[in-house]
Amino acid sequence: MMAATEEQRQLELNAWVEEATAVIVSNAEARLVRAQLINHYQEHRMTLEADGWSAPDAHAAALARLGSPSEAQQTWVQRMGLAEALPWTLGFLALSLQLGGVAGWRMGVYLSWLAAGAAVVLGGRRLGRALATLVTYWQGQWSKLPSSLILVGGIIGVAIGFEPVWAGQPIWDGQTLDVMMMWWKLPVMLVSLAVLAAVTWRGVYRARTGAWAASGQVSGGAALGLVLGSAVGFGATWEWLLHDVVPAQPGHVGYLPHWPWQAVSYTLGQHMVPAVVVLTIWVMGVATIAGKTRTRRQTRDLAMAADTPD
Amino acid sequence: MKDGPGDRLVAIILAALEEEPAHGYLIARRIEQWSRGVWALREGSLYPVLHDLEAQGLLVADTERQGQRSRRVYRLTPAGHARLARERTHWQQQTQVLSQILWRERTTT
């Protein structure tokens, strides 16, 4: 009876620790924090029991002192750097646009269902965590934004959403966006790459455990992108089956007859999506190299800590 | 700003590590003891802050083995000491201003 009760306490502790660390992206860091939290609980409980507390009371008090797991999760998210969330976000954008847009609706359907299968095989439990991390991070960021920025962002979002409608129209100096993108592309991309490299390097180089240092994180990000890309593929399937989709062509805007604003234009497909893909690869590359450089020494510590049974 | 000057928990943790290194549990006990039990932390939220301060280079951690267990013992870096000095200045100013407001001498109208 006693053993069963103690087992129940351990299960309760494990559930607490699992939930509290669910949003940590890096496996190595999550393992380390779990060990720290369990040590913390055990030290507190042993101290209380040495003072004459019964095991159930000491357990309850030690667990209560840790607070709620959701509070701990929130604290992690508040402290999470953009460098940790950016690759996930870009990965999602790149792959979902890639599957749904560049490859065309029909190819997007085939690719996305293949991707969904691969994601199921590769993903497992980490996908849920990664998704929770991504959603919670952006929820937190959203709540920090000033309302004026949200308003401007919304206007830009609507403008981009209606992009197929105005993409063929002259927007500045008699030129259409398609033409302007031809000479905007290179300088904009160079500046973007330089800024992203600097920001990412700074963020990840300072990160103790380098969430993106481990190759597993990169594959996790790719798997997440595949899953979300498959969601777009589902949409593509839906549209393919129900609508006669007009594909995008140079100089013309592809559209869905009933929802023209949701079409993927030639401009978006041919210019922006490759740019996003390049940016994603760039960010992941810089983050990985920076993380590996910074964490070479720390990896030894983590390996030692990982020996702790948790 | 996620932890600019004036983040109370950051200042408290840095102060708890000023004189000698400590692991998470000991940091929590020090804070509880020094505040005479008034500030009982939600201790599960202590570790995200510790990891963040470590990532910022304000703390470093050494892994210490104790029997079967290993634990992370944190100590301040020079940058951590400098940050603590800034926090002290900041909070001194804040408490002075607060005192002036709360205990101001009322003028007769």
Image: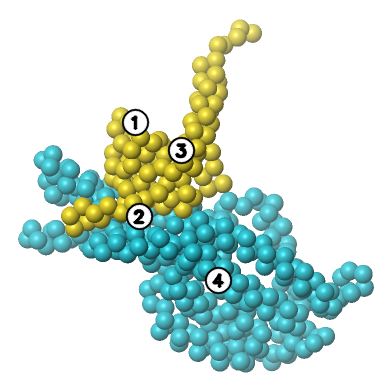
Chain colours: A cyan, B yellow
- Residue closest to the eye, A131 or B53: B53
Q: Quadrant of residue A229?
A: bottom right
Mark 2 or 4: in front is: 4
Image coordinates for residue A3, horizontal then vertical, percent: 9, 61
Badge 1 and badge 3 in a common chain: yes
Vertical relation: B46 (above or below) A235: above
How dense is the environment of label 2, judged by Cα within 10 Å: few (below 14), some, or many (20 and up)? many
How dense is the environment of label 1, judged by Cα within 10 Å: few (below 14), some, or many (20 and up)? few
Q: Which residue is mark 1?
A: B35
Q: Which residue is mark 3?
A: B81
Q: Which residue is mark 4?
A: A284
- Chain containing mark 4: A
Marks 4 and 3 close (CB-CB < 8 Å): no
**Residue at mark 2 to residue at mark 3: CA–CA distance:** 31 Å
Marks 1 and 3 close (CB-CB < 8 Å): no
How dense is the environment of label 3, judged by Cα within 10 Å: few (below 14), some, or many (20 and up)? some
Image coordinates for residue A1, horizontal then vertical, percent: 7, 60
Badge 2 and badge 1 in a common chain: no
Image coordinates for residue A132, horizontal then vertical, percent: 45, 65
Vertical relation: A120 (above or below) B63: below
Between disc 1 and disc 3, whose residue precedes? Answer: 1
**Residue at mark 4 to residue at mark 3: CA–CA distance:** 34 Å
Check disc 2 and report its element: helix, strand or loop: helix
Disc 1 marks a residue whose amino acid type is: Ser
Check disc 3 and report its element: helix, strand or loop: helix
Mark 2 or 3: in front is: 3
Mark yes or no: residue B85 visible. Answer: yes
